[in-house]
Amino acid sequence: MNFSGILIGAAVFVTIGLFHPFVIKMEYHFGKQSWWVFLVIGLVCSTASLLVADKTVSILLGVVAFSGFWGIHEMLSQEMRVLRGWFPENPKRQAYYQERRRQLKEKTRSK
């Protein structure tokens, strides 16, 4: 029996399940400027995926790498979700959110 397909499927499920709250927490505490953490994760895991000889481990590293790259997109989207009120904003960063809302209003008025 070959369990690598089941292992990879479970790893994708777990990776997505871990990255989703990680994105939310990173945006809450550090803002969208912490997107570079996901870039580093993606680059490191991509490089490791190319260098590892075992196919299953290489695939798993690739899954984590591209979940990291997707995390960059999600980080930017998460800020918009917070601005819309779908997620709580960090009270310590309230001035930042007010300024971003003001910028977005000006942007939509100028169109």
Image: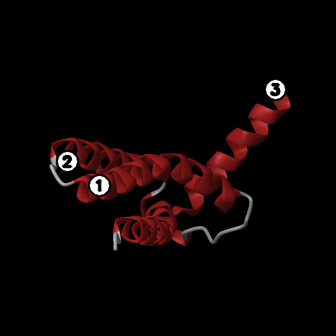
Q: Mark 2–mark 1 contact, CB under 8 Å?
A: yes
Circle 2 is placed at which residue position? 48
Q: Please tell me how crowded label 1 is: few (under 14), some (14-19), or many (20+) other residues with Cα within 10 Å.
A: many
**Residue ID at (81%, 34%):** 108
> Disc 2 to disc 3, how far (Cα)?
46 Å
Looking at the rendered structure, the secondary structure element under dot 1 is helix
Question: Where, by quadrant of the figure, is residue 104 drawn?
Answer: top right
**Residue behind mark 3:** 110
Q: Which residue lies furthest to the top in this view?
A: 111
Q: Which of 28 and 52 is in front in this view?
A: 52
Q: What residue appears at the point 33 percent right and 47 percent down from the top-left corner? A: 42
Which amino acid does the dot numbered 3 rest on? Ser
**Residue 109 location, x and y as percent?**
84, 32
Q: Residue placed at 26% from the left, 50% from the top?
A: 45
Q: Is residue 23 above or below residue 74?
A: below
Q: Residue type at mark 1?
A: Leu
Count of numbered labels shown in the rendering: 3
Give 76 or 10, whichever is nearer the viewer. 10
Front tag of 2 and 3 = 2
Residue positioned most to the front: 1
Q: Name the residue under label 1.
A: 61
Q: Residues within 10 Å of mark 3 (few under 14, many from 20)?
A: few
Residue 10 to residue 34: above or below = below
Q: Quadrant of the N terminus?
A: bottom left
Q: Nearer the viewer, mark 1 or mark 3?
A: 1
Q: Which of marks 2 and 1 is nearer the N terminus?
A: 2
Q: Residue 56 in the image: state x and y as whole percent.
A: 28, 58
